Amino acid sequence: MDELKQKWNARYREQGDLEVKPCQVLSCNAGLLPDSGVALDLACGRGGNALFLASQGLRVTAWDISDVAIEALQSRAREAGLDIDCSVRDVSASPPAPASFDVIVVSYFLDRDLTGPLQQALKPGGLLYYQTFSGTQRNGRGPSNPAYRLKRNELLKLFSDLNPVFYDESGQDIDGECQFIARNP
């Protein structure tokens, strides 16, 4: 964990104070969000999703392995007057508890071993928003290791116990991304 934490801390230090935005699948489909509830921004990075979810009136928890990212998110949340429960957490080693969230957002993070725990962590009727890299890296964007990129229709298979609401992998073959929203029955 220490090596991984150091890697991400270094990356967030390099990036400095860049503007943070929510992932596209969340911002373009915000109308699906509940009026209230508890949301998790898993592997939150600089916290664009967490800040957006909190601005929509949800109680937000944000976890990341990087204490640099978490400190920056806490500062941004204070400046915006938003209450976000931020924690340094290795989500692979310590996944969310069952039936604890109405919304879970995962962007640009892929740990296939977490799919079962993520499905279980959704309350009945809860929504999963997921966006990450797919296909083969061609333009230097995203991970070069294929283990961290989705294969065709992979999210549909990994989260087969959920009911798909939206799925787009149209960029699959061109260094693209996959966007997915599903509801827990």
Image (tube, rainbow, N blue to C red):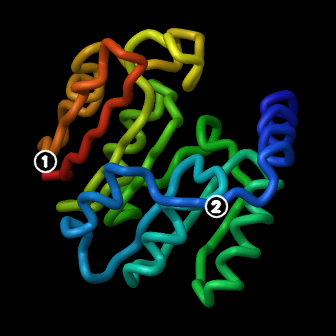
Q: Nearer the viewer, residue 179 or 89?
A: 179
Q: Nearer the viewer, residue 133 or 162?
A: 133
- Name the quarter where the N terminus is drawn: top right
Residue at far bottom of view: 81
Vertical comparison of 76 with 68: above or below: below
Q: Secondary structure at mark 2?
A: loop
Q: Return the x and y of residue 11 as percentages of the image width and height.
A: 79, 38
Q: What is the number of the mark on residue 52?
A: none
Vertical comparison of 182 with 49: above or below: above
Residue plotted at (51% across, 28% down): 111
* Displayed quadrant of residue 75: bottom right
Is 76 placed left or right of 26 in the picture? right
Is 175 placed left or right of 70 in the picture? left
Sequence-wise, which precedes: disc 1 or disc 2?
2
Residue plotted at (75% across, 55% down): 69
Labels 1, 2: front one: 2
* Displayed quadrant of residue 142: top right
Residue indicated by mark 1:
165
Q: Return the x and y of residue 105 as percentages of the image width and height.
A: 41, 53
Label 2 crowd bin: few (<14), some (14–19), many (20+), radius 10 Å: few
Identify the amino acid type marked 1: Val
Q: Secondary structure at mark 1?
A: strand
Q: Nearer the viewer, residue 115 or 13?
A: 13
Measure how far apart labels 1 and 2 are at the Cα level.
Answer: 29 Å
Identify the amino acid type marked 2: Glu
Q: Nearer the viewer, residue 90 or 137?
A: 137
* Displayed quadrant of residue 84: bottom right
Residue plotted at (55% across, 24% down): 141
Q: What is the number of the mark on residue 19?
A: 2
Is 112 placed left or right of 179 in the picture? right
Q: Return the x and y of residue 107 as percentages of the image width and height.
A: 47, 43
Labels in figure, total: 2
